Amino acid sequence: MLLSIAWKNVWRNKLRSLIVIVSITVGLLGGLFYLAFSNGMVQQQINSSIKTEISNIQLHNPKYLINDEIKYGIDNPENKIKKIKSLQEVKAVVSRIKSVSMISSAATGTGTTLNGIDPEAEMQATDLYTKITKGTFFKTKLRNPIVIGEKLAKKLRVKIKSKVVITIQDMSGNITYGAFKVAGIFDTHNSIFELGNAFVLKKDLTDLIGYHENKITEIAILLKHNDMTNITETKLKNMFASEINSDELTIRTWKEINPILKMLNDMTIQFTMIFVIIILVALSFGIVNTMLMAIMERVREIGMLMAIGMSKVKVFFMIMLETVFLSITGGIIGLFASWILITITNKTGIDLASVAEGLNSIGYSSFVRPELGIFFYFFIGSMVILTAIFASVLPARKALKLNPAEAVRQDV
Amino acid sequence: MEHFLAKFAKHIKKKVIELTRLIIVISYLEFICLLKIDFWDFTMSIIKTINLNKIYDAETEIPVHAVNDVSLEFEAGEFTAIIGPSGCGKTTLLNLLGGLDRPTSGTVTIDGTDIIKLSSSEIIDFRLRNIGFVFQAYNLVPVLTAKENVEFIMQLQGIPKQQREERVLQLFEQIGLKDRLNNRPGKLSGGQQQRVAVARALASKPKFVLADEPTANLDSKSTSNLLDIMEKLNEVENTTFIFSTHDSRVMKRARRLVSLEDGKVVSDNNQMEHR
Ligand SMILES: Nc1ncnc2c1ncn2[C@@H]1O[C@H](COP(=O)(O)OP(=O)(O)OP(=O)(O)O)[C@@H](O)[C@H]1O
Ligand SMILES: [Mg+2]
């Protein structure tokens, strides 16, 4: 009965209730979309980072991580790769020889990490080859081909077939030089990665630095799904327990490889949550105000109800329900509208071309697909309910303070 | 022998008649006694006030002595009007009788319960179970239908659905609004709304109904119609009605008139009858 009265009371002043509901809807729409947008941006960054750059899990010699000299490598990589490939979560495994180097053109020079790769295997594990905008991904007859990022190409002012010189330390610690020809230029929308990495054939690199045939510095593992990262990490740690114990191998997930990515993820969610909570607090003031007005208008009626024997608890509960119904109606519509907007924009994507330059330079893609896990809808939903209850206490208490004798008098 | 038998039969017949007479006399006496007890019960006062005072703004320079030393008794089945000019304290007195307000001093005893001593939540429950209210206006919840308004108070009392339905139909029959059960108050005339309010006041079978100027907003036809219904319910359900008015047509219908002036009882035809 109280439920039905409260619900009917919500619709007593349709315009006023609608205004409150619309304001809740718009507030939630704004908050949730902002949340989804930020989240989409971060998730996309994580995904593209995993797919193009770091993969889900990487194996290194622990000493290499402290001092990235090529002599700290992993022995017998083929053997280990075979073992890793036997895990069902694993989609692809690739090995690389990585070394810091100096790359210079006729115009200028800069420091970059030189990746010695096997193109066939690399194409299984990363999607870098899909980012090629000029030239090809090592499908060339050029001798000593090198693939670099667009940002780096611009910096060096080089084009396809331009010559670049690599300065690098060889195995015996001497500085050596090698001439390479630009075979392909990729564009990942991530300036840091583009400037920091250049790719050459593994064979060319080993020839240049006199590296062992059966040694590499990095094994990268792409999983079927990012959710499997932690399980696979555990499995790998068991698999290579002895190597890990003897300090020959260390296993890291993307969260450890790129802790900033993880921090970015957590922080973005936290900040946007705070933003959403501020919206909800602001909305709750609107709700309180509306409900106080509704009670002022109904002083006589509430007084009458108390006079005929409606207990204080029931009056309190009735007003509370009214407030909660009002808020939750707005909440449901708001969540639903947000879901629709987020689903649509997730399909179409949003191109932030106008601010893209700025975003690219901090490692974000300018094309954003807003996305929000179901958890957030439930979380925000319960926040709305909490807000509603919080907002209902004041009006309900106000109603209780009415004196029925005064309330029922005509001249009140 | 025959003679003896006839004599015996006659004797028996005489005894039987005597016995029958005795039984009749005893039954009669019993009946009288029962009636007497009933009658005694019937005349026991259900509301009693002793030296009731209500002073508004007591601490200010112009205190208002709205109810001044009122000692009254109301009995079950009464149909009483409290009359007097505007501002004489009718509303204040009714509010005190119904426990809506607390007196400055004095007592209100309802059916043996001193309601002044009840806590504020106890008194709400007491009102729910014992007192029906009809106000001048704003009696009904506008978002509920006439039926729901009447049913509501029974729901508060926890009366089961079946019983509620029966009672609602019975009451709407008596107030003559059976065809308006599902109308909201906004669709009813002022008189019809007041009739629904009377039905609501009676729904929970209270000990008495307090009505503060129930006819003040009604035209004369609706007024007499409402009074007809109140009178009928007073007889059929034996409900006590105490209402205030300053309408002389309404006063004429009351069986007892308590007249107030400046918060004091200046005349009470019930007491004069007794003396
Ligand atoms: N809350 C209050 N504060 C101060 N004075 C009050 C208050 N309520 C009533 N009074 C005063 O008490 C007196 C009695 O008022 P009351 O409303 O009981 O009169 P009434 O007989 O019902 O009048 P009416 O016929 O106009 O309804 C009046 O002088 C009124 O001004
Ligand atoms: Mg009055």
Image (spheres, coloured by chain):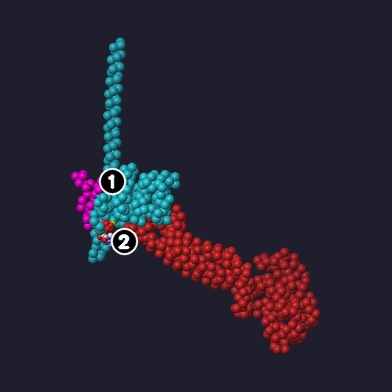
Chain colours: A red, B cyan
Name the quadrant containing residue B137: bottom left
Residue B66 horizontal/vertical position (percent): 25, 58
Name which residue lies at 22% across and 55% down.
Answer: B261
Observer able to see residue A169: no
Q: Does residue B256 show up magenta in the picture?
A: yes
| Label 2 element class | loop
Residue bearing the label numbered 2? A411
* Residue type indicated by callout 1: Glu
Name which residue lies at 70% across and 65% down.
Answer: A89
Could you give the CA–CA distance between mark 1 and mark 2, rounded to whole angstroms?
30 Å
Q: Does residue B169 show up magenta in the picture?
A: no
Q: Which mark is residue A181?
A: none
Ligand 1 closer than 8 Å to the CB at disc 2?
A: no
Residue A393 horizontal/vertical position (percent): 43, 63
Between A328 and A66, the one lying in front of the other is A328
Q: Count all numbered tags in the image, as a single digit.
A: 2
Looking at the rendering, the quadrant in which ligand 1 lies is bottom left
Residue bearing the label numbered 1? B78
User: Within 10 Å of the Cα at label 1, are there few (<14), some (14-19), or many (20+) other Cα atoms?
Assistant: many
Name which residue lies at 76% across and 75% down.
Answer: A119
Chain of the residue under the numbered disc 2 shown in the image: A
Name the quadrant containing residue B170: top left
Q: Is residue A410 above or below residue A154?
A: above
Chain of the residue under the numbered disc 1 shown in the image: B
Q: Quadrant of the C terminus of chain B?
A: top left
Please report the bounds of the magenta region as a residue range: B252-275
Answer yes or no: do the residues labelled 1 and 2 have beta carbons within 8 Å?
A: no
Q: Is residue B24 above or below residue A316?
A: above
